[in-house]
Amino acid sequence: ERNQRGRLNSPRNMKSVSLVSLLAGSAYASHCSGSNPPVYCCIMGCDSQYANNPSYFGPGTTPACGQPGSTTLSAIFEVAREGGCSPLTENSCSFGPNVWTRGTCSEETVLQGSIPGSAPATATGDPHLTLPHGGRADFRGEHKTLYNFLSAKGLAVNVMTELADFELHEKNHSWHKLVHGSFLTQVHIIARTNTNKIVEASFWADKIGENNAAWANFTVDGGAASSMGPKQTKQLDDVKLQTDYSSLHIITKEFEVIVTPKFFRKEKNIFGLHHRLDLQFKLLVPEADMAVAPHGIIGQGWDRDGKAIDGEQDTFPVSGEFTTYSMAKGAIEGVPNDYKVASRGATNFKFSRFDATSASPRDVAALVAAGELNQPKKTEALSDMVGATEYNFSNF
């Protein structure tokens, strides 16, 4: 049960013990220290859009301890340790049963050193967007079509949406759904270095195998392609490419972009796809310090007003057949077609900022007046979100 701010209520009555509440006090923290922490059963909440969208998968569906979809606290500690989660701080990482985290982390991705008050933006699942300043939207896209999600000075992030049919719940379940949806299956990042080299890095869902190990390739100035596997780093002037076991990080002066492959867990009977790609965008500098305000379907949300703008979101039925329809209407300037790019390495589209030397943020007031954007709203303080814990995982 949750109160109005999204916190977990009555933890003593919960069958599973949340790591967030577990680590809230020093007594509990010491209880979990050492090389063999108790095997509490937790869900990797940060990996799940389902907790944030009960109509998608339904409430009360947290897998029982030991069932598929659940994991142990010791495994969570190991994931956090491998991801560099030391210490665990607000906006870096949080774990627990159905933790409501606005998508601020995933199983292997731990964000560090973020600008105070600036939570990462994300694209997860089929695809659910967590926008800068806390807005939310869904984006279906068209089949095998490339869109720009982030355009900044010397940086472009293009994604491919691919339509797919899948089922939620077993056929005999009262919440069974046949969904005609979509996922991100390719991510292409183009970055200009401080010596004007062009780095193009690509991550493909269909290249990821059963072990979920990272595989990416990149070129410099259109030269021969090089590949990267797990746990590798390539420093190309001031642009850094780095892989964890599964994820790819691209770090520039202003942004860190993280691509993480995901198995399909809740989605059943997907034909032709075995992985999706989830994205995180982390701003590394204050918005006001950027001479070129970013754009793109997600990037435009860094508009310097600190307010959330929600876009269109799919409303799933309790059961039956459903086709997703949302294209982030109300959260984006213009229309979705304005964000299409001609090829994976393209940087030009209507709102491109790649070659700009100066650019103002979108004019929110004018776009609201014109009916293109929904009304901005203040968001709750980040400290009010689940996950505001301080804990050092370095000893695990």
Image (cartoon, rainbow, N blue to C red):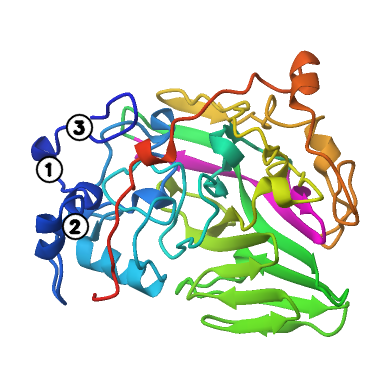
Disc nearest the viewer among 2 and 1: 1
Task: Give the image quarter of residue 61.
Answer: top left
Please report the residue visible at 63 percent of the width from the left and 27 percent of the height from the top.
311
Disc nearest the viewer among 1 and 3: 3
Q: Secondary structure at mark 3?
A: loop
Asked if residue 146 lies in the magenta stretch, the reply is yes
Asked if residue 267 lies in the magenta stretch, the reply is no
Question: Which residues make up the magenta segment?
Answer: 143-171
Instruction: Name the dominant secondary structure of the magenta segment.
Output: strand
Quarter holding the N terminus? Answer: top left
**Measured Cα–Cα span from mark 1 to mark 3:** 12 Å
Q: Is residue 185 left or right of residue 386?
A: right
Q: Earlier in the sequence, mark 2 or mark 3?
A: 3
Please state the horizontal and vertical placement of residue 337, each as a whole percent of the image.
83, 36
Q: Is residue 39 above or below residue 326?
A: below
Please report the residue visible at 65 percent of the width from the left and 68 percent of the height from the top.
250
Front in this rendered view, residue 269 or 29: 29
Residue 215 in sight here: no
What residue is pinned by disc 1? 15
What residue is pinned by disc 3? 9
Q: Earlier in the sequence, mark 2 or mark 1?
A: 1
Quarter holding the C terminus? Answer: bottom left
* Residue type at the position of mark 3: Asn
Q: Is residue 331 above or below residue 91?
A: above
Front in this rendered view, residue 354 or 276: 354
Label at residue 327: none
**Measured Cα–Cα span from mark 2 to mark 1:** 13 Å
* Residue type at the position of mark 2: Gly
Q: Are marks 2 and 3 in contact (CB under 8 Å)?
A: no
What residue is pinned by disc 2? 66
Question: Tag 2: Cα neighbours inside 10 Å, few (<14), some, or many (≥20)?
Answer: few
* Residue type at the position of mark 1: Lys
